[in-house]
Amino acid sequence: MRYEKHKRRKKRTSTTILLAVLLLVGATAGYSYYQYKQGVNQSLEKINNENEENNVNEEVYTFDGKKDQYGATNILLLGSDAREGEEKSRADTIMIAHYNEDKGTYKLTSIMRDIYVNIPGHGKHKINSAFMRGGPELMRKTIKENFDIDLQYYAIVDFEGFVQLIDEAFPNGVEINVEKRMEDYIDIPLEPGLQRLDGEHMLSFVRFRHDAIGDFGRVQRQQQALQAISDQLSGIQTIPKLPKIMGVVTPYVNTNMDTGDILFMAKDFFAKDRGNIETFRIPIANGYKDASIKGEGDVLDLDLKMNREAFHQFMTQ
């Protein structure tokens, strides 16, 4: 009799614990969804109040992507430089984020927009025109043909989304060293020195390229900025903020990734002591020559074999 009472008590305790866990999970999921929707509504309200044009999320793209031969998930990151009145635009920024779940590694490759490569079905042109000619799918095919790497996902980011991400995640700004005064062809000039930049100032920092080293300096600053953002955003304390941050950025991003995929990779990224993000640039040093092509202007003419081999070495190291 005593055994039966003990058994019933144990069963009731187990049931109570299970119920409590389920309630906690449900409450967490509900709160996360609420925070996500708060972020979405915050950005939509801003867009409507300022009568901004935000076309990045409107077009539906096909994308025949898959994991690469090394088991990594590669995400094609595109920044659009659409001008007012333009229906099609070239890619202003081309990057690939690499995530290898088995190794627990995160890497980033920047592809300079003026490299001169074959675009399937269109002949040789600057790589940034692949986006204008055929969207992210043609950019995927172009990268696959020239560098033999598969891409599984894409994300097209409106630059205003970058501004909103910074302002939401970093109320006091991102600490970064501005190496020189920057003022030409950017909305907000920057003074040199170590400082905290809000979203608009960070956008000026990553887009500036009108100096002696041009787009090479811009790519270097983009990688520097993303490293600073990831370092200052990382840590277990960031995870509760992710749903709101995702919501804020969502209206400015067109992607084939679902929310679950993004949260899984983001949570893994912020929860791990991963160290610095390894970065790579195409073209590599001494892997190109400057050229001028009729109808294209100034281009970077690649030693394709040298760049492809160095890229694959970076991917596998």
Image (cartoon, rainbow, N blue to C red):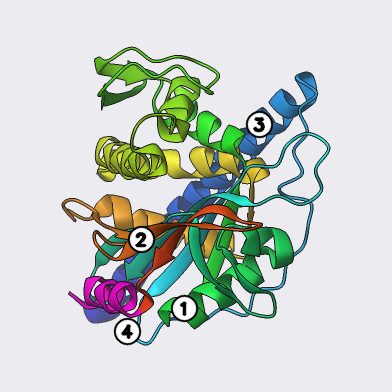
Name the one closer to the observer, 47 or 258: 47
* SS of the residue under disc 1: helix
- Report the amino acid beneath label 3: Ser
- What percent of the width, then of the height, locates residue 119? 60, 74
Do the residues bearing badges 1 and 2 touch, measured as CB atoms within 8 Å? no
Q: Earlier in the sequence, mark 1 or mark 3?
A: 3
- Report the amino acid beneath label 4: Tyr
Disc 1 target residue? 146
- What percent of the width, then of the height, locates residue 109? 35, 60
Label 2: how many residues lie within 10 Å, few (<14), some (14-19) or many (20+)? few
Kindly report the distance in space between the C-alpha atoms of the residues bearing marks 2 and 4: 30 Å
Kindly report the distance in space between the C-alpha atoms of the residues bearing marks 1 and 4: 17 Å
Disc 2 target residue? 289
Tell me where residue 154 sits by quadrant: bottom right
Q: Which mark is residue 70?
A: 4
Q: Earlier in the sequence, mark 3 or mark 4?
A: 3
Kindly report the distance in space between the C-alpha atoms of the residues bearing marks 1 and 3: 38 Å
Q: Which mark is residue 43?
A: 3
Q: Earlier in the sequence, mark 2 or mark 3?
A: 3
Kindly report the distance in space between the C-alpha atoms of the residues bearing marks 2 and 3: 43 Å
Is 53 placed above or below 19 here?
above
- Report the amino acid beneath label 2: Lys
* SS of the residue under disc 2: strand
Residue at 43%, 64% (x, y): give it.
301
